[in-house]
Amino acid sequence: MTAQPRTLRDQRVTLSHGGGGKAMRDLIEDVFTSVFAPPGMEDQARLSHPALTEPGAQLAMTTDSFVVSPVEFPGGDIGKIAVCGTVNDLAVGGARPLWLSASFIIEEGCEVALLRRIVASMAAEAAAAGVSIVTGDTKVVGRGAADTVFITTSGVGVIPPGRDLRAEAIQPGDVAIVNGVLGNHGAAILAARGDLALTTAIESDCQGLGHLMEAVITAAPDTRAARDATRGGLASALNEMAEAAGVTVELDETALPLHPEVKGMCEILGLDPLYLANEGALVVFVPEDQAEAALAAMRGTEAGRDAVIVGRAQAKGPVPVTMRTAFGGTRIVDMLIGDQLPRIC
Amino acid sequence: MTAQPRTLRDQRVTLSHGGGGKAMRDLIEDVFTSVFAPPGMEDQARLSHPALTEPGAQLAMTTDSFVVSPVEFPGGDIGKIAVCGTVNDLAVGGARPLWLSASFIIEEGCEVALLRRIVASMAAEAAAAGVSIVTGDTKVVGRGAADTVFITTSGVGVIPPGRDLRAEAIQPGDVAIVNGVLGNHGAAILAARGDLALTTAIESDCQGLGHLMEAVITAAPDTRAARDATRGGLASALNEMAEAAGVTVELDETALPLHPEVKGMCEILGLDPLYLANEGALVVFVPEDQAEAALAAMRGTEAGRDAVIVGRAQAKGPVPVTMRTAFGGTRIVDMLIGDQLPRIC
C-alpha cells in the first residue's frame, strides 16, 4: 500500500502496454502493484494462513468477471464491484475471505487516470473487507475489441471446520431475512446510463458482506444458507435456493425493503424490483427460533442496518417461490427469463 | 466430465444468456458445468487436499486473462492456452497445480459450437495436467463490446514444504536450460492471422509444464528458479530474472533451439525469435553440478524432449543479458520495448 513514485508518463493505455516488455512493466508497477502489493512480487502469490491447516477446514474458491457499463456510477465503480462481488460470493458460502486475484482487460485508449481511480477503489474495498489482492494480470486489446476495462477477480477463503451452509439445508419453517433495500444497484446503473433522462439520488448498494455474514453465523449458528442477490435479483436467487432445497418460499410483498425512488422508477418503467440486480444485498435462511438473533446481529452491522424478515420456507408447493401481495392475493415469482438489463455487473 | 443431454437450442449467444435468469442457467449447465464439474455445484468451490495441511506447505495463487486472436489457431485455441498458461505459472514457481477457475466474457453472437470446442479443449488440457476446473462465471456483452470470447483463469496449487524457487536465488555459474523450440507460438499466431499470406506448418507450442517441472526439481533438488517465456519471449523473461538475481546471463546463439520455419520467418520479417511469445517454453536455472541431471530429466518428459543448455549466469556486468553470436561477437539482449505482436495470449 506504499505509494510509489509515478513513472508512467502516458495519459492513455496503448497496445505497447500489453506487450510483455518495458512499457507493460511500467504500467503494472506504477498503476497496479504499487497500490496492491509490495514491489518485487512474483507472478505467483505464495500464501499461508493458520486457518487453512485446521483439521476439517476447507478452502473456498470463486471467480467472477465484471463488465459493468458505465464503469463509474453513483455509489461505486467496476473496481469496487469486482472486490465486493467476489468477497460476497465467498462470504455467503460461509467462507472467510482471505485473498483475491485481479485481472484486467483494458481497451487501447483507456485513460490511465481512470485506471488509477479504479485501482484505488479496489484497494480501499479490499482493506475494508480484510482481504489482500495478491496477484494479477493485465492485457491490452485494440480499440473496439473491449469496452474500456473488464476486471476478473478470483477469491480464496477458508471455511472453518463444521460450517456447512448450503441451499439444500433449508427446511419448511425457516425464515428468510434480507439485509437491506432491494434493486438499488440495477436502478443506479439504469439511471447512470442516461438514456432515460432521469435524475435520481439512487446509489448502488455495492458493499462487502463478509463482516455481516460472520455476525449472522455467530448469532445464529444453525444458519442454513445465504445467497447474494446479484444478476437476476432476489427472485432468481430465491428460485435457485428453493429448487435446491425442495421447498416453496413465500414472500410478503409488504415486507420487501424498497427505496422510495426505486419503487417509483419501477412503477414508471414497468420494472419489477425483485429482478433488479443488487451488489450488496443478500438473503439468509435461518431456523425460526434463531431468526430474532440473526436479525439483531445483522442490524448491528453497517451492511445490515435495514435488515428485515421477508418470507418463509414452506412445504414444497406447485412453484418454488410465491408472494403474498399487498392486496391479499398470491402471485408466482418466477425466475428471470431473458435479460432485464445487460451489463449491470 | 459426464456428457449431459444438450438442452440449449440457440446457435449463438445472445444478451439474454448473460442476464442471470433461465437462459443463463441453460447456457452454463449445458455448455460449461456439464463438462467441467458435476451438476449442482455451488457458485463457490469447496476444496480440500492433504498437501495443503502439511506443515510448511504454502498455497500458490495466480491469474491470467486470455485475449488471443484468432481464438483457434494451429496447435491450440484460447481454452487450451488459458489452462496451460495458468498451470505453467503455478509450476514454474514450484507449485503443484491443483485447481483452476475459469471466467468467460462472451460477445453477443458468439457461436455456441465454438464455445463447446473451447470448453472441450480446456477439459482435455486440465485432465492432462491433473488439475480440476472447480468454479467459473460467464458474462455476455453486446456485439462490438468484446472480441468473440475472453477467458480468465486463476489457479491454486500447493508449494511443498522447503521448496523455494525464486529468481533471486540464481548465482554466477548457474546453467540456463530451455525445454524446447522458441517462438513457435508467436509465429503460429502471426501466420494464422492471414495478413502475411504465409503458408507454414508451424504450430503453437502451447502445452502444460507441470509434469516437466516436477521431474526437474526431483532430479535437480537445488533448482534455483524457472520462468515461462510467454509475452516478451525468452529475452524478457531472462532480463527480469537476471535483474532480480543481480547477475548477467550470457546466452549462446548457436545453442538456441529454433524450428527452421520460425528461423526463416524471422529472417524474412525482421523479427527476433528471442522476443516471440511462447506458451509451452520455459527457462530453468540450476547449479552447474546438477545441470546434466536436470537436462536428462527434462528430456525424459514430453514437453522437454528438445531441452538444451542455452547459457549461463555470470557475475553482474553492465547489462542483464548478453549473447555470444554465431560469428563470435557479443550483443546486448534488452527487454522488449513496446509491442512486437498484440494479443498473442
Image: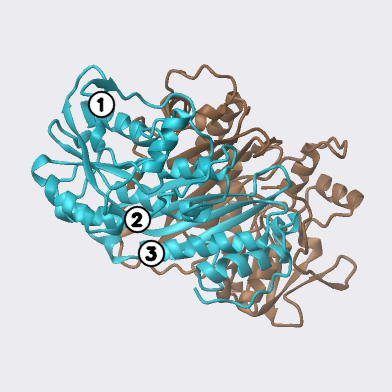
Chain colours: A cyan, B brown
Residue A156 at x, y percent in the picture: 39, 54
Residue B333 at x, y percent in the picture: 79, 69
- Where does label 3 land, which residue? A128
* Residue that appears at 24% across and 28% down: A326
At label 1, counting other C-alpha atoms closer than 10 Å, the crowd grade (few under 14, some 14-19, many 20 or more) is: some
Q: CA distance from mark 3 to mark 2?
A: 16 Å
Residue A207 at x, y percent in the picture: 39, 54
- Where does label 1 land, which residue? A325
Disc nearer the start of the sequence (1/2) = 2
Pick the residue in front: A331 or B25.
A331
Pick the residue in front: B65 or A230.
A230
* Residue that appears at 31% across and 44% down: A282
Compared across the picture, whether B61 is left or right of B115 comes to: left
Residues at badges 1 and 3 in contact (C-beta under 8 Å)? no
Disc nearer the start of the sequence (1/3) = 3
Q: Nearer the viewer, mark 1 or mark 3?
A: 1
Quarter holding residue A329: top left
Q: Residue furthest left?
A: A289
Residue type at tag 1: Thr
Pick the residue in front: B29 or B219.
B29
Q: Chain of mark 2?
A: A
Compared across the picture, whether B161 is left or right of A246 comes to: right
Compared across the picture, whether A25 is left or right of A343 comes to: right
Q: Under tag 2, what secondary structure?
A: strand
Q: Nearer the viewer, mark 3 or mark 2?
A: 3
Question: Residue A157's mark?
Answer: 2
| Location of residue A329 with respect to B149 vertically, above or below | above
* Residue that appears at 42% across and 22% down: B4
Residue type at tag 2: Gly
Q: Under tag 3, what secondary structure?
A: helix
Q: Quadrant of the N terminus of chain B?
A: top left
